[in-house]
Amino acid sequence: MSRTVAVYFVASPLQYLAARAVAAEFERGSRQVLVWYKRSVGALVQTQDWDIAAYMPWPRWEPLPGVWGRLRRLRANIDAVAALVGPCERLHLHSAVYDTEAINYFLRALPPRVGAHTMRARILPDGLISTRRYPLSRLRRVLQYPRKLRRLVAPELDYWCFGGDRIGSDADFCDRIYVLSGLPYAYPAHKVQVLPGLARASAPAAAAPRRALVIGQPLSGFALMSAADVQAVTMEVHAALVAAGFEHIDYKPHPKDRLQELAHADYRQIAPAQALESHLATEAYALIVGVRSSALLLARQICSPDTRVEAFGWSRIRFKSEAERQGFEQTFRDAGVVLHP
């Protein structure tokens, strides 16, 4: 029997990297069980990092065939995860959110299935979403209770109702909230645990070719900047990189940017199919640049402290209001991103 088992429910590259950091730094000695419920995450999974890892079908999108397929999928998922966990004394569950049924039911169903005497739920960071609170409205709280009706046909499906923040940060079952270093948060201070850097790649050695990464984003297409300003910023970024003597410059296009803004003929394009988070976790850069992309904030959290992260063209960006501009500036600066006008 394992004394402590840590289970990680993940649905994005960032959540996967955060789970890996938690396992290495805060759950040493625990049996490590990874469960991913978005198929695209499977390409990132390195099985040697986990005692066991498996995909879990999401009940709403992949119900079992036949009558009550969604309910039967919920029960099947509990059976499958219980088999992965095995008998244990203590159970530590990790997820970015706990209000969704597919995760919430594990809070009460899994401990008795594996013989755990204690259960703790921890929250994984989910990028910018984790920088603010999302209080449950009175209606959302009331709508939690009908979910308990599943107990009439499946006693183990006992939804754990809670109030406050919808991800579960205020709930009694949550004792720890992991956050990314440098990003602001609005959670109870006594529950917060700051994660170390998520990257495994260290900064390039002094003798290695200096590498830079340009992160593209749809600017004119999303009315964040005029086409003329996009062209001007593109040339400013290129000139700055050349002046700094970078020998190798990569360009990561945004998947929704058909214009591939900020690209340049001198850059080497990275395959757009690869998630940026996983790329940053394995490739070392001396400098990462962009404009107003939230990817710059993630880069600052994922990469080595020796990697510089800078945003160009800030004075050219169209904000909805001065308050929005100030809010973005504060967030970027707090995260350690250098802003250029």
Image (cartoon, rainbow, N blue to C red):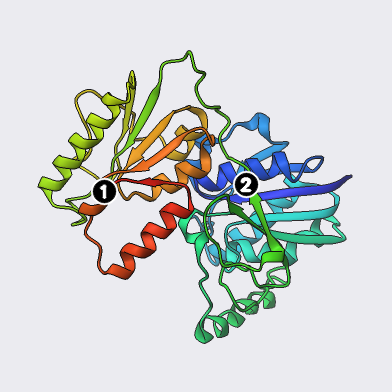
Instruction: Answer above or below: position of 284 versus 36.
Output: above
Residue type, label 2: Val
Are dots 1 and 2 in contact, CB under 8 Å? no
Of residues 171 and 153, the one drawn nearer to the viewer in this rendering: 171
Which quadrant holds residue 259? top left
Instruction: Answer above or below: position of 103 versus 269.
Output: below
Indicate the secondary structure of the residue bearing disc 1.
Answer: loop
**Which residue has dot 1 on it?**
341
Indicate the secondary structure of the residue bearing disc 2.
Answer: strand
Q: Earlier in the sequence, mark 1 or mark 2?
A: 2
Residue type, label 1: Pro
Instruction: Answer above or below: position of 78 versus 139.
Output: above
Instruction: Answer above or below: position of 250 versus 330.
Output: above
Which corner quadrant holds the N terminus? Answer: top right
**Residue 309 in view in this figure:** yes
Q: Is residue 177 left or right of residue 203?
A: right
Q: Residue furthest top?
A: 207
Residue that appears at 76% across and 45% down? 27
Residue 35: numbered disc: 2
Residue that appears at 60% across and 54% down? 179
